[in-house]
Amino acid sequence: MDALTERIESGDYPPGTKLPSGTELCAEFGVSRQVVRSAVDWLKARNLVEGAPGAGVFVRERDAG
């Protein structure tokens, strides 16, 4: 969660960017799919990303203010 949040907030993953797949995130961080799902759910709950069924998970536009 922290690494993905940092990448979003720093602009490494700008708005509109598709996050890496669950498989890629599992491999990169050495965690299970459940951990990746939990992290993505956490990011969704904080309105940092949104899921597009069949297309993936994308970084949301930042709210002004």
Image (cartoon, grey):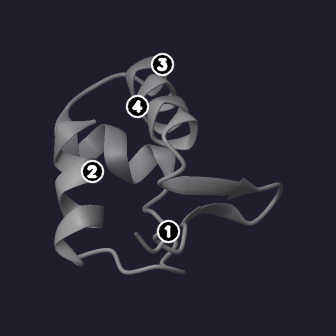
Distance from the alpha carbon under mark 4 to that under mark 2 = 8 Å
18, 61: nearer the viewer: 61
Which of label 4 and label 3 is nearer to you? 4
Quadrant hosting residue 7: bottom left
Which mark is drawn over residue 4?
Answer: 2
Q: Do the residues labelled 4 and 2 touch (CB within 8 Å)?
A: yes
Tell me which label, 3 or 2, sits earlier in the chain.
2
Side of 35 relative to 52 (left or right): left
Tell me which label, 4 or 2, sits earlier in the chain.
2
Distance from the alpha carbon under mark 2 to that under mark 1 = 18 Å
The residue to which callout 3 is attached is 34
- Bin the neighbour count of mark 1 within 10 Å (Cα to Cα): few under 14, some 14-19, many 20 and up: few
The residue to which callout 4 is attached is 39
Q: Do the residues labelled 4 and 3 touch (CB within 8 Å)?
A: no
Quick check: 16 above or below 2? below
Q: Which amino acid does label 2 sit on?
A: Leu
Quadrant where the image shows the C terminus: bottom left
Which of label 3 and label 2 is nearer to you? 2
The residue that appears at 37% across and 80% down in the rendered structure is 14
The residue to which callout 1 is attached is 63
Q: Which amino acid does label 4 sit on?
A: Ala
